[in-house]
Image (cartoon, rainbow, N blue to C red):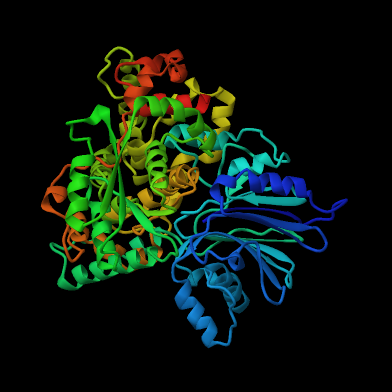
Amino acid sequence: MCGIAGIYAYRDTPGPLDLTELRAMRDHMAVRGPDGCGEWVSADGRIGFGHRRLAIIDLSEQAAQPMVSADGAAVIAFNGEIYNYKALRAGLEAKGGALHTQSDTEVLLHLYALKGAAMVHDLRGMFAVALWDAARGGLLLARDPYGIKPLYYADDGRTLRFASQVKALVAGGRIGLDPDPAGWAGFFLFGSVPEPYTVHSAVRAVEAGTTLWIDRCGPARPTRYFAVSRPFAAAPKKLAPTPTVDARERIRTALLDSVRHHLVADVPVGIFLSSGIDSATLLGLMRDAGQKRDVEAITLRYDEFHRRRDDEAPLAAFTARHYGARHTIRTVTREEFRVDLPKIFAAMDQPTIDGINTWFVAKAARERGLKAALSGLGGDELVGGYPSFSDIPRWVRLTRLGSFVPFLSAAVRHAIAALNGVVPLIHPKAAGFLQYAGSYSGAYLLRRGVFMPWELAGLMDRDFMREGLRRLDPIKHIAAVLKPEPKAAWSKVAALEAGLYLRNQLLRDTDWASMAHSLEVRVPFVDATLLQTVGSDFAGLPAGTGKQLIANSPSIAVPPEVQNRAKTGFATPIAQWLQDDERVRAWREVPRLRSANCPWARRWAYQIARA
């Protein structure tokens, strides 16, 4: 796990690249890689890579990056982990390859020499790769299927710059800072900036599951090699009444296989342990994978949640004892939040309403000496654990009639919007229900949206807002995730949740919030191989069955007390703290945010934007 940066002057320029700029970009990410730093610049000075290292696999200096191939034909800077690198290495050696380190990085160099960009199809892991191909005179950028690891670039028509963080690109001093209307509109709509946009017009994300080739002609069109909707598109439309014996065994085997791969490391791997099924399942499977003792499990607790069902600690402690893990319960106080808030804002690479919980649990894990930890992130997207899996299909069925009555939905929206200021119990989104809930894209925006499109006028300059909505086209943006489109309603929601909420918010927030503490977070439920193996199995099951299946997949099942507990997840009392911290009261300037029925996420989103 690392931070990567680079500059490629692909057109004729007056001189070589600015090494000071490259180092500024690299060293802005020092916390991502405290174990070492490196740089490489080509002989003609037209391309250079920078690297900050967090050593997880092959801790020796031989595995340092940027790494040059033995024949000098390729150079790589790589962020992430390739969990199947040992199997790939064995295959390369069988073909006569001579590898000199025990690193996954060297495996990538050899695999590229054999297969070129098509090597991405062989990789199981999380990765953002930059590889210079001297023979072809071009740069390859590649990102993992789900987009677990971030990668951003800026192209001014002569020079392309890339980095693991938007702020690292900005730190180089050569990136324009004009705000992107689409990025900002997307933030207010979704609570995170939807890729490929960022908050800066000059910066774009390399999208999840794509490769990008840059040579003397400039960047080519990105090539998509993985779409998260594809496995769901192959799922049956009709639900099975119960899972078959084969399906149960396939799910158990696939989950254990994923956990085994995610434990590949030359340092101890701990776990974030909540009181829920997902993390408890992972802990049980860690035991089955051979880690029967000394697993470090980390749980957060808050004084505000004491003796309430939000308190994760008691049941998490029970789960830890159940599986024999070494358990740390870390209390986060209001005062610690006050002290850490400026650090959180500084570490937050792009605006988001989430990530606070990961910040503190990653901080606690690092305090315990961990450099890597598993998280149950992605379990709900895989097995249908969110209310959206039932809400969205139901809304679509109920509301499709409105789309056949001209002007009805708009008239109802305006009427409810007018009542919202008079009748405080009406939810702000209610005004858009008839207009949006009749399609899966619209219903998803209604379910996951922080603000609705017509509400942005009070938060952004009107012209800026119109341009942002025009370029983003939120309904079209959401619908693009459903290509190819799954047949079943459940599968449609699963693809939307994985391709939007998981990708743009949960995974991105996990990256910046954990790497701010030099901690690598691994997510066994977010695994393309796992999805392709059992995605259709989960898609064909009745509601709630998927959670039961994963809970019973360890040889020692997740305790009934955990299986039967109402879902809470990693919660924080941020809503309460928001009311009391004088530094985060800018939202009080906006009348609609002072309304009694205003969700706290709206206030926090406005505060984040101001910060």
Query: Is 47 on the left-hand or right-hand side of 476?
Result: right
Q: Residue at x 79, y 52 (%)?
A: 17
Query: Is 22 on the left-hand or right-hand side of 479?
Result: right
Above or below residue 7? Residue 585 is above
> Is residue 419 or residue 265 the one in the foreground?
265
Asked if one can make out residue 35 in the rendered structure from this viewpoint, the answer is yes
Asked if one can make out residue 543 in the rendered structure from this viewpoint, the answer is no
> Is residue 598 or residue 235 the one in the foreground?
598
Above or below residue 171? Residue 552 is below
Q: Residue at x 29, y 20 (%)?
A: 597
Above or below residue 99? Residue 287 is above
| Residue 44 percent across, percent down from the top left | 83, 62
Query: Is 72 on the left-hand or right-hand side of 168?
Result: right
| Residue 488 percent across, percent down from the top left | 28, 57
> Is residue 115 or residue 26 the one in the foreground?
26
Q: Residue at x 50, y 55 (%)?
A: 208
Q: Residue furthest right?
A: 14
| Residue 443 percent across, percent down from the top left | 33, 40
